[in-house]
Image (cartoon, rainbow, N blue to C red):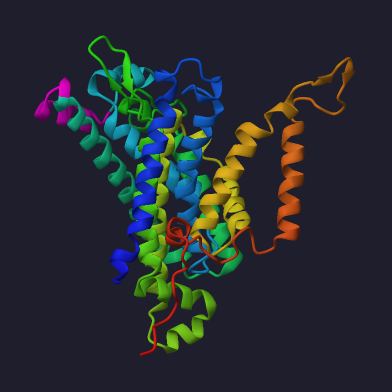
Amino acid sequence: MSEKKSNLPALIGIVILFLFIILLENIRSFIPGLPMIFDPMSPLFTVLKKAAVYSLVAVSMNLLNGFTGLFSLGQAGFMLLGAYTYAILTVPSAMKDQVYYLFGGCAFQFSLVDFFQGIFGSAGAGYAVGLILSCLIAIILAGVVAGFFAFLIGFPVLRLKSDYLAIATLGFAEILRAIFQWQTLGPVTNGANMIKGFPTFTSFNITGAGGQVVLRLSTFVPFLITTVCIAIIVLLINSSYGRAFKSIRDDEIAAEAMGIRLFSHKMLSFVISSFFAGVGGAMFAMYVANAQAKAFTSTMTYEILLIVVIGGIGSVSGSVLATFLYVACSEWWLRFLDSEQYIGSFKVPLLRNGFRMVVFSVVIMIIVLFFSQGIMGNREIDLNAIFTGKKRRSGSQGK
């Protein structure tokens, strides 16, 4: 059986997952009596959307840190570039004066949304096609802009090693955040104010003639984009380029002796990782419905790095699994620790605002101490084995 056919169960499983996500988000519309957890505004869907976005960024960081061995901390900066690129390109022209009112309007009047509405129309199927194309192109351009800046700074910073590379990329991200909040650039970046009014995940919900939502797709869309992007990264890792990245991680001298061009492969890994971080930044802007530089702090990079470490440096599926666990704990499961709780008339001690983060930090410390290689280490989850119950054979078969 060919490798293409052997991947069919995994592809079927992913399609089933997509259908399940769509059903999960819409099931309360058909069965109103279900618990509030199935409401589209519940923490469950907040976790699913944010985790989908963070999964892509975590995998992109793992490509660089885990598979190539380059310790970079510039992920938030590239996400910022992606978020602003997407926002600036998709804010409708009619909204720009309102968004940029402090600066007398936007210096960049072009809008992909208006462009495609002019071609396909602003209603019906034409509007849907225009919306999809404008968002898709804007997301790709968000990645391209992030990759371009990575290419520019890669020449000086990729010659640095270990901690020095981390400091340089972290400094780049902080400088970039300060520049985007610079009031002089206000007609483009809106200064320290947020950019809003562009299409978000909820824009993909299908509505009826009266404006009511007929089919919700706001959770399905980030899952779809993230799955496609991670699949591309996995294909890259399993290619000859991916093997070159791993050899550089393991031993640069041996890799160079085998004919691998160190700098060009490091640059390639850096640019590709930054490209997908830019895509993740665009998706983050769609998730929070705004783009504002102050959100992309070094803390965001540390969160992504922590997710990579918890999942396992060198494991794509570990990064994805750790992302959903991390986001679920921080945004949902441990929220009750921030409010006072009573058992009968007895008040549970210590529970107050901020205690959630204390417990969360202790849990993370335990994981790091007792699972030094992360949840998955450098192993991967075999989707074919899950959906067929059979393990894939490694190596070639003897005659």
Depth check, front residue: 196 or 218:
218
Above or below residue 100? Residue 20 is below
Q: Residue furthest left?
A: 119
Query: Which residue occupies 77% across, 45% down?
Result: 362
Depth check, front residue: 99 or 375:
375
Residue 82 is a magenta residue:
no
Q: Position of residue 277 (x, y in %)?
A: 42, 49
Query: Which residue occupies 15% across, 31% down?
Result: 116
Q: Is residue 290 visible?
A: no
Q: Quadrant of the N terminus?
A: bottom left
Displayed quadrant of residue 162? bottom right
Query: Which residue occupies 39% across, 56% down?
Result: 150
Q: Residue furthest right?
A: 346
Q: Position of residue 118 (x, y in %)?
A: 11, 26
Q: Is residue 257 visible?
A: yes
Q: Tell me: 213 left or right of 330.
A: left
Q: Position of residue 179 (x, y in %)?
A: 45, 40
Region rendered in magenta: 107-124
Q: Quadrant of the C terminus?
A: bottom left
